[in-house]
């Protein structure tokens, strides 16, 4: 607690706040409201329950329990909600945030430390919030001689590219932000942007450690891209489709990992390399090259890149689940109704609490199992970080180019034999449909 | 909607292509080239060929652009591009390329390509049909292509391999 300024007067403080409030009120009345009305005049408004959804109707529906469900139902089925909130950005960011906290606690326990402890009384549960506030309030230092345009653009590109990968991952039947026919290829195409962004950012930092880290990242990602793509191929052959939802749907009898364990292993290793996680964290090897390509990042630039990294972690773990762990399939554990007898009752508040019309047991079940499986894969990645040392760069390249590519072919041949032998696949003995 | 997208993509593609040619800074030229290639992928998406679009992104942005930018960074020196084109040469170049464009436009407009008619119900190109044809009727072509590519890669490896530094790199057995 710093001492107060001697010229401080409480009256002045209150006065400044009142002035600010008046200013905001004037601003809203004179500028914001006219703009909103002007825009609403031209934007075609959607129809909900047979009525045009104007903002007034929206607010009155939100406070009326009997009419809240239709408007919510409408809202969660808009494309914007899908991209920004549920299977898209906010959901992934939430998982990313919990991953960061779990990672810090888990690694601390594995190394006989305590980890975050003080923020938020219970086991440092608010540590992440404190870190986020700290990152936002920190000054962003641009190194002298840096290429300013690329230096500012690259972190934003990094996050948006990660979010683009996240948008392709389905979490339940029909619940995906972008349902692309060639989903798997799209994922790999978008992942191909990362080496470019990292290389440009490391060059723009105008410092030698970032550039070394950027070159390492480039080598590593290019070396592991081919086994990454090849290891996903047998799942495509089974499903007969590149669409990620169809690949998940094709595993309703057995999980793909039972038939192609080697490929799942290769995919896991390659995704670790793609994510630059230990043992493949050469691009940011903190004991050799300061922090690799992240050396010159500070404040929110670092925060954005970390956010992008963990979004990517979620996306690749989700991809692993979709390709090998049976997607969203799991035993049905949710009841058909949240509150038994709510759908026939007359009390509208009870129907609201039971989420009548919103609650779909199959979808909720799918989301639950998908999230659980994704967290298991993420935990595997975290544990790998806890128990492995960093490997040398020549071993890394040797692993990528020589060993993993050969390993993917073994399982590819096994799968092709099973399909041509008429045992699995479309029209096989253990047929999917 | 599609028209607005087409115009936007055209501006993006042609604009970044012009920037990539005109930029004094070689690195910005490389980035503009990547954006231009991305715009071409956008055209493929408009044409309902998402498969080709994704490979355009994966190969041209993910590999070729990275290679170009990497090379620019390695050979970077402050005054690589010092020669300025004179206005006369610039204008004559533009006129020449426009004439070339008109010539090709005339060729294509008079060829059988303009006779094709597309309907919304049936996709113009069925990627599954192409795959089936490649593996059945045109399989010899596929095999020859595969051998050519394999030969090219092996040749490139043989050229890139240097005997004199081999012992230093390989660990002692």
Image (cartoon, rainbow, N blue to C red):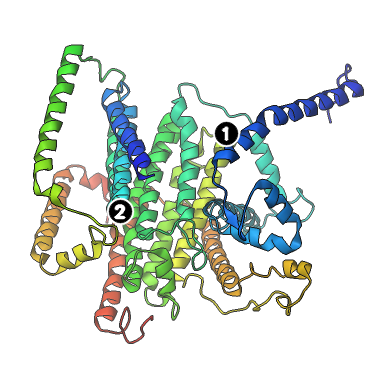
Within 10 Å of the Cα at label 2, are there few (<14), some (14-19), or many (20+) other Cα atoms? Answer: some
Label placed on residue A353: none
Q: How many marks?
A: 2
User: Is residue B135 placed above or below A11 in the rendered structure?
Assistant: below
Q: Residue at x 67, y 77 (%)?
A: A337
**Residue A279 visible to an observer of this rendering:** no
Figure quadrant of the N terminus of chain B: top left
**Residue A204 visible to an observer of this rendering:** yes
- Position of B120 with respect to A333 (left or right) is left
Residue that numbered label 1 is attached to: A298
Within 10 Å of the Cα at label 1, are there few (<14), some (14-19), or many (20+) other Cα atoms? Answer: some
Q: Residue at x 33, y 56 (%)?
A: A400
Tell me whether circle 2 and circle 1 mark residues in contact (CB < 8 Å): no
Q: Residue at x 37, y 73 (%)?
A: A260
Figure quadrant of the C terminus of chain B: bottom left
Considering depth in this image, is A10 or A278 the residue closer to the camera? A10
Instruction: Point out residue A351 in the picture as x, y percentages from the top left corner.
Output: 73, 70
Residue B118, by quadrant, is bottom left
Chain label for disc 1:
A
Q: Which dot, 2 or 1, sits closer to the camera? A: 2
């Amino acid at each position: 607690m710093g001492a107060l300024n001697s010229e401080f007067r409480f009256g002045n403080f209150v006065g400044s706040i009142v002035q600010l409030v008046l200013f905001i009120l004037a601003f809203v009345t004179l500028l914001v409201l006219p703009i909103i009305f002007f825009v609403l005049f031209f934007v075609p408004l959607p129809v909900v329950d047979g009525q045009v959804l104007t903002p007034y109707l929206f607010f009155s529906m939100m406070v009326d329990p009997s009419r809240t469900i239709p408007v919510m139902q409408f809202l969660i089925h808009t494309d914007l909600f899908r991209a920004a909130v549920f299977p898209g950005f906010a959901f992934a960011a939430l998982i990313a945030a919990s991953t960061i906290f779990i990672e810090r606690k888990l690694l601390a326990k594995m190394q006989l430390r305590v980890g975050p402890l003080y923020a938020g009384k219970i086991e440092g549960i608010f540590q992440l919030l404190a870190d986020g506030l700290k990152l936002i309030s920190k000054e962003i230092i641009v190194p002298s001689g840096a290429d300013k345009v690329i230096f500012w653009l690259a972190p934003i590109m990094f996050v948006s590219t990660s979010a683009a990968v996240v948008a392709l991952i389905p979490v339940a039947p029909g619940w995906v932000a972008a349902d692309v026919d060639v989903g798997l290829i799209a994922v790999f195409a978008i992942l191909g942007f990362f080496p470019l962004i990292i290389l440009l950012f490391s060059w723009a930092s105008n410092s030698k450690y970032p550039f070394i880290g950027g070159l390492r990242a480039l080598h590593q990602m290019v070396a592991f891209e081919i086994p990454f793509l090849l290891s996903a191929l047998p799942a495509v052959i089974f499903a007969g489709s590149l669409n990620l939802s169809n690949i998940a749907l094709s595993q309703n009898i057995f999980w793909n990992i039972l038939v192609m364990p080697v490929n799942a292993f290769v995919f896991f290793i390659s995704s670790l390399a793609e994510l630059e996680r230990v043992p493949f964290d050469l691009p940011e090897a903190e004991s050799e090259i300061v922090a690799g390509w992240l050396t010159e990042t500070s404040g929110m630039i670092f925060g954005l890149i970390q956010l992008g990294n963990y979004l990517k972690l979620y996306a690749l773990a989700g991809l692993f689940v979709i390709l090998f762990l049976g997607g969203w399939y799991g035993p049905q554990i949710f009841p058909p109704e949240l509150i038994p007898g709510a759908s026939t009752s007359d009390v509208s508040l009870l129907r609201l609490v039971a989420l009548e019309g919103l609650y779909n047991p199959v979808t909720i079940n799918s989301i639950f199992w998908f999230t659980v499986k994704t967290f298991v894969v993420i935990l595997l990645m975290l544990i790998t970080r806890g128990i492995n040392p960093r490997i040398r760069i020549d071993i890394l390249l040797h692993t990528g180019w020589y060993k993993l590519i050969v390993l993917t072919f073994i399982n590819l041949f096994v799968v092709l034999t099973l399909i041509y032998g008429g045992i699995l696949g479309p029209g096989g003995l253990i047929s999917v449909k | 909607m599609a028209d607005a997208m087409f115009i936007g993509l055209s501006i993006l593609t042609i604009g970044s292509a012009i920037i990539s040619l005109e930029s004094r800074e070689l690195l910005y030229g490389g980035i503009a080239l990547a954006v231009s290639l991305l715009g071409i992928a956008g055209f493929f998406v408009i044409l309902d060929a998402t498969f080709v679009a994704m490979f355009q992104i994966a190969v041209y942005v993910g590999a070729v652009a990275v290679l170009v930018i990497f090379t620019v960074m390695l050979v970077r020196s402050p005054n690589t591009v010092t020669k300025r084109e004179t206005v006369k040469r610039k204008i004559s170049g533009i006129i020449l390329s426009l004439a070339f464009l008109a010539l090709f436009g005339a060729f294509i407009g008079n060829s059988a390509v303009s006779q094709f008619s597309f309907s919304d119900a049936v996709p113009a190109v069925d990627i599954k049909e192409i795959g089936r044809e490649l593996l059945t009727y045109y399989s010899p072509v596929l095999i020859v292509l595969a051998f050519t590519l394999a030969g090219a890669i092996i040749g490139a490896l043989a050229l890139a391999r240097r005997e004199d530094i081999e012992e230093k790199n390989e660990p002692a057995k």
